Amino acid sequence: MAEITTSDVRAHLEKIQGQTVTLDGLRRELGIVPGTKSFSLVRNIMFRLVEQKVVKPLNRGEFKVITQVRPVQVYGRERRPPVKINFPKDYNTMSQIDIGEYVTVREGDLFLISGLSNQGKTGLCLNFCAENLESHPILMGNEYTTIDNEPQSRFLSRLDRMDWVQWANGNGEDKFTLLPVRDDYAEYVVKDKLNIIDWINIDTEFWMISRVMEGVKRALGRGVAIIAIQKGEGAAAGRGGQFTKDFADVELLLDKYSETEILMTVGKVKESTQPLSGKVYAFGLRDMGVKIVDFRALRKCGCHKGWRGQKKCEDCNGTGYTDA
């Protein structure tokens, strides 16, 4: 039998890029018999491949096969225009909420809606779905289907309350796709579509939201994702803290503004035609939380967090904000 060569080993390793191999395992896979010259040659070849950055040494006799990458050409590449995503409308005016005029959305972008429980996450998600029905969006998450994979009654009632939306086409077929998915979302993302996930639940290791979001982004292709997660009261990020921001391109934070209204703070925005991060808005939600009303910009009040001395500020009624 001919002696093993560097080319032989490289050819085998190309098939298992990203995996871990041992010298003994590699010998078995290549059919090398103990006591032959090739048996000892494998070790020398592997260390030669370390210098060539084909493998990386780990523990004794163990190597990681490096995934090979090629340079990406930039000059002369096609410049794709922004993606058209319609933002929700104010039901009173039927006009798009104004931040939608300034956000620039690109293929593969991810919107993150982090909000307190019962503070408008599902309302925003359903309105995004409604305004983009012609692109046949995908719905999944914890808010829409039962454990028996049927539409939740509350979800159906919300659709009925959105009386300005035609959810089905002329043949009675849904203009959106409802998937009974509550976990492993990246595996079910439909490539090149608008995927809405409401909401993602992580019980303990909240930092893992970053990995979930990364997986979703990788699966999107030219599509866009809108995902909702829970947030603590007054927190500057959703559950997972800074990790929630790693893969977000647009971040909306929802808190309680008053007994009847929601406070929306714009967090991270990767691209916009005017500064948006830090801007604050208020709006109401009517009819089971699906009709956005009185959407407006706010500004900080001159008081100190809603107080003037020992008294609640009368200008902002203790909220810390007044209408802009």
Image: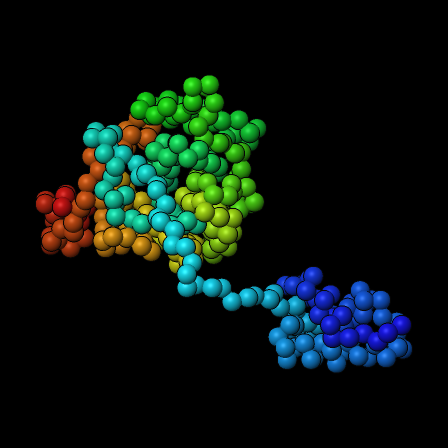
Residue shown at 35% from the left, 41% from the top: 85
Residue 256 drawn above or below residue 74: above
Q: In x, y percent, where is residue 183?
A: 54, 43
Q: Is residue 303 left or right of residue 37?
A: left
Residue 322 drawn above or below residue 274: above
Q: In x, y percent, where is residue 310?
A: 12, 52
Residue shown at 71% from the left, 72% from the top: 62
Q: In x, y percent, where is residue 56?
A: 64, 74
Q: Is residue 279 left or right of residue 151?
A: left
Picture quarter with the N terminus: bottom right
Q: Is residue 7 visible to the viewer in this orientation of the structure? A: yes
Q: Quadrant of residue 31?
A: bottom right
Residue shown at 86% from the left, 79% from the top: 37
Q: Is residue 119 left or right of residue 323?
A: right
Residue 10 drawn above or below residue 90: below
The one of 132 and 301 positioned closer to us in this rendering: 132
The one of 81 and 251 positioned closer to us in this rendering: 81
Residue shown at 31% from the left, 24% from the top: 164
